[in-house]
Amino acid sequence: MPWDDVLKIIGAALFSVVSAGAIVVGMASWLGKVWAERILRNETHELQMKLAVAQSQLDLSIKTAERELDLIKDAHARVHSDKITIYRGVIDLVAKALANLDAFYNSRLPPDEAARQFDNFNEQRIRLYGYMAMFAPQTVMDAQDKLIDHLLCISNSRKPYVWAEVRILALELINEVRLDVGIDKTDISYNGVL
């Protein structure tokens, strides 16, 4: 067989192998691309599903946290409102007691009426003390104790009735209450002349 024929056969074989290789490589490349796209699509879908579940869980967590925060805010608002109501009751009680003491010591309130008013004051102060003990910090309780103890000593004639001393103790209580309810952090003082 002549070399030309051998070379033609080898060339045809090589061409066939290279063509087949190119076809195989092309098909493999195309098939790899199709599989990669399919795998990518499946992975993307799976990740989107996981993301949707995670987003749903996050939304649920946020809603739960918002509900809990609302409950905490409502509870805080109720406690704050209760504190203000109780503190108003204490101030009203002290104001009435001071008015009665002033009336008694200025001979405008007879002794039997003063005794009845004191009994009423005593009952209400014990009740309000229990209410305050549920909400008030110790600083408010201490200021209230100092004022009430002083008033009790005056009522039992163990201390003289001196309005300036009572006013100082009353302002100490009011300042502690103001701090507790957050109205103002600065103390108030009496700047009058009496």
Image: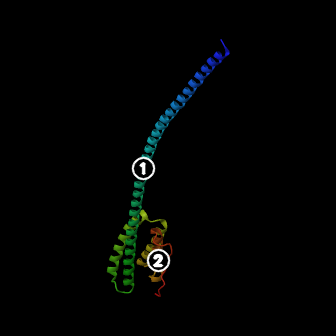
Which corner quadrant of the image does residue 49 belong to?
Answer: top left
In-image side of 138 versus 9 (left or right): left
Label 1 environment density (alpha carbons within 10 Å; few <14, some 14–19, many ≥20): few
Residue 181 x %, y %: 44, 68
- Residue at image position (43%, 73%) is 148
C-alpha distance separating marks 1 and 2: 50 Å
Answer with mark 1 or mark 2, whichever residue precedes in sequence: 1
Residue 56 visible in image: yes
Q: Quadrant of the N terminus?
A: top right
Residue 59 x %, y %: 42, 50
Q: Which label number is shown at residue 59?
A: 1
Which residue is more in the foreground, 73 or 93?
73
Which residue is more in the foreground, 142 or 34?
34
Q: Please name the residue that numbered disc 2 is placed on.
A: 171
* Amino acid type, residue under disc 2 in the picture: Leu
Which corner quadrant of the image does residue 8 belong to?
Answer: top right
Label 2 environment density (alpha carbons within 10 Å; few <14, some 14–19, many ≥20): some
Residue 162 visible in image: no
In-image side of 169 versus 93 (left or right): right
